[in-house]
Structures are given as C-alpha cells and as structure tokens.
Image (cartoon, grey):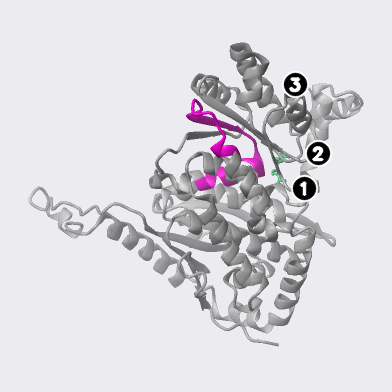
Amino acid sequence: GPAIPALVTEHAIMSRSFSLSLHRFGADVMAAVASRVADVTFQARRLKADANGVAAFLQVPDDDANARAVADRVAALPARFRKVLVLGIGGSALGAQAALDALKPLRPAGGREVRILANLDPVSIADAMAWFDPADTLLNPVTKSGTTVETLTQFALFADRIRAARGEAGLKEGVVVTTDPQKGALRRVARRLDCPSLEVPPRVGGRFSVLTPVGLFPIACAGHDVTAMRTGAREVIAAFTDGDAAAHPSVLAAAAQVEWMRRGAAVRVLWAYCDRFAAMGDWFSQLWGESLGKPKDDGAVGSQPVRAIGSTDQHSLLQLFMEGPRDKTLTFVTVGGPRPAMPVPDLSALDPDFAEFAHHDAAEVFDALRCGTMAGLVEAGRPVAHLHVPVLDEAAVGALFAHFEIETALAGYLLGIDPFDQPGVEAGKKFAHGLLGRPGMEAYGTAARRILGTEDAQ
Ligand code: PA5
C-alpha cells in the first residue's frame, strides 16, 4: 500500500488555515501508523462512502440551501433586535460558543450581542433573564430532536417572558426556532406560532452540526462571515474526500491517536495557548468523548478528552502531564494572530530580574513558555503533537471544525465502533422523565428512587 508521505503535513490547500506536526509523537508509533496505511485508507474510504448517510457532516459545508435560509433570516431580522439569546445544550450550543469565543477579537461591524444559555442551572437562567429584554432580544431555541428537557424548559421560561411583555404577536416576531424539519415539540411550536424557523438536517448528528443553521445562525447574528467559515471547512473536507486520504492531516491525526490508544493512551489532552480557545476545547471534548467512548466486544474503547489552556495550566495540570501516568497524548494548539503588539517595558532599573523580559513582545514571552513546556514533555518521552493556526479567522475556525470532525469520525471507524450514536446517554434521560412524571414513564421514576435510595433521590 501507499506509505504515509510525511509526518509534518502542510497541505497547500490548507496551509492558510492550520498546520499539524506529529513529529514528536514517537518514531515507533508513526512507523506503526505507516505500516497500517492500508487499513487507514480503507477506513477513510468507508467514511467517505457514508457521506450519504451517517457521515452526512461531510456534506454540510455544501448545503447552500440551509446557508441561504440563515442569511435570509438574519437579513430579515427587525432592527430592534440588537441582542440574541440562544437556548440549547450539547451539540446545539457548544459549536456556536466555540466560534463566538474564538472570533471575539474580530468585532465585526453591525454584529449583534449573542449570548448562549447552555444549561438549566437556575442561577445562570436568572442571570440571563436579567439580561434578556423582549424589546431588543431575539430568542433562538435550538434543538435538533425538539425533545430535550433542558431546552424545552428554558424555552418555556423565556417564551413566557415574551408573551407577558408583547403577547402572541411578540412570540411570532421574537422567536426563531432551529430544529428538525418535521418532528418534535419545537417544530410544532413553530407551526403553531407561525414564527420563522431554520432546519437541522436530520442525518447530521448533534455534535457534528455546528456548520448547519444550529451554529451558522448565532454566528451570523454576531456579524461573522459564515461564508468564509463554510469555505474553510469545505477545503479541509474536499482535501479528504477528493484527495489522497493518507496525506491528510486529519487522517494522520486519527491514525496516530488510535495507535496510541491501542498502546494504552486513556487521556487525550488538547492544550491551547489561547484563552479564546477554551470553548473550542469544550466542543472538542464532547465530539471526542461522546463519539468514541463506546462498548466494544467484551470491553470498551475511548479516551478521556481534557482541555487545557496555556500557559495557565503549566501552573496546574503540567505536573500530572510531565510525571503522571504515561497514558496521555498531548496536542498543543498555537495561534498566530490577530493579536495586538505588546512590547514589554523595561523595568530593570526597578529590579534587574525584569531585564529578561524587557523589549520582548508579550507574545514572545508567552511562546517561550509554551516551547519550554513542549521541550520538557518531549524530553520526558511524552507524545506531543502541534497544531498551529496562523490566523484565527472565520476560515480557520471552519477548517478546525472540519479537521476535528474528520479526525474523530475516522478514529471511530479505526476503533471499530459507531462514532455517530450515543446510546449511553439515553438511560439517564428515561429515569429523569419518570421522575418528572411523564405519562407512561412513571415506572422509571420509581426505579430511579429505588436505585438511589432516599439519600440521593429527590
Ligand atoms: O451530540 C449530541 O447528539 C448531543 O449532545 C445533542 O446535541 C444534545 O443532547 C442536544 O440535543 P438536541 O439538539 O436534540 O436538543
């Protein structure tokens, strides 16, 4: 079979978005990846073939109809809506939050203030309630299934606020629903209210849905260029579907991660030297954790995603990474720009220790800390990959979404499990519905109380 062509891969087509280096992942591990290239390319072909079914995320950046629906909807928003409150959870919230945080410094002109309420913690809801004003805030409930307890409960609370302030007409004008085209409570609400709605393509799984209207609408409301984001994603996906899979960074990354998992890696660290990447780490954690943590034969597969932020976590998690169990891979993420120039003033007259930093840019000091930590980990024999993003703009964010989605889905195929299902999260939902008294599900509530006993059950 064909050999893995390079361990440092910088696709011409992708070079403006990011580069990935697996140099420090261990020569023997990469040799094992090279020896498995036939299986890797076979699984990559299976994944591509599934683009018409379970792997529909590969077609999302080409979905012009839904992108146009988003653009039309944003253009038609009444001018009074200067703010947008998104309600959602899991795959219906994390991707949009990741993009909004990553792109925050771009501050596009005319962008609306977009806030995402991604939990049912009453204190967080009260905080959002205080911010929410039906006169200037659009409500965007997002749920693919249209049945999620948290999102429906949030919607009841905020829709009631709108109705109290502006009546049914306020709901019709002040709500944009994002949900399944046919099914679920939110679709029925959209029909009943005759309010605007956007569609989540039924074949695209929640955690792979950020580039559908689920993420595109909030990101576009904030004024970001979602066309560039889709283009960035499309380039990465086209290089996978139309190019040499064995030369694709996402394929190599998946193969290398799986090889490490076979050798006992139980933890996958994504360590970004970029504060505004924290939510991207949360999005990735869901993608990696929920897609790969599955039963297999008599055991289980998966690795624990951990998101770290540098240099902050050098003062927290680094000791564990450096000298703790040898069960981790680490992917460093660095970002070039945009960033302000920030030369460090010379305070050496005050104290000579400041001379070391004087006249370096703050970014140089920051990067020296990252390099020092990487060098230490490499010297300690820990597997380190490095993903560099020259410019963190919309195209790069789209490219990163596509990269991590391909890497995760292909890792699932290489591990021999279905990366697109999540049967393990269903059991708890049944118990919760039972406890809440859903007709026909009372037995689950009784069972939950019996299992938990009086100490833990409500
Ligand atoms: O990835 C997934 O499928 C889940 O995390 C869902 O996104 C999450 O449960 C929310 O589901 P829904 O969009 O149906 O409300």
Depth check, mark 1 against mark 3: the one in front is: 1
Q: Quadrant of the C terminus?
A: top right
Q: What residue sits 76% from the left and 40% below the top?
A: 180
- Which of the two labelled residues, at mark 1 and mark 2, occupies the earlier sequence position? 2
373 relative position to 180: left or right = left
Secondary structure state at the residue bearing disc 3 = loop
Please say if the residues under marks 1 and 2 sit with CB atoms less than 8 Å apart: yes
Q: Which residue is mark 1?
A: 202
Neighbour tally class for label 1: few under 14, some 14-19, many 20 plus, Cα within 10 Å: some
User: Which label is found at residue 182?
Assistant: 2
The magenta region covers 73-99
Q: Quadrant of the N terminus?
A: bottom right
Depth check, mark 3 against mark 2: the one in front is: 2
Secondary structure state at the residue bearing disc 2 = loop
Residue 195: horizontal and vertical position, in percent? 68, 28
Q: Which residue is mark 3?
A: 458
Q: Is residue 179 visible?
A: yes
Question: What's the amino acid at mark 2?
Answer: Gln
Instruction: Pick whichever, 83 or 327, lies toward us.
Output: 83
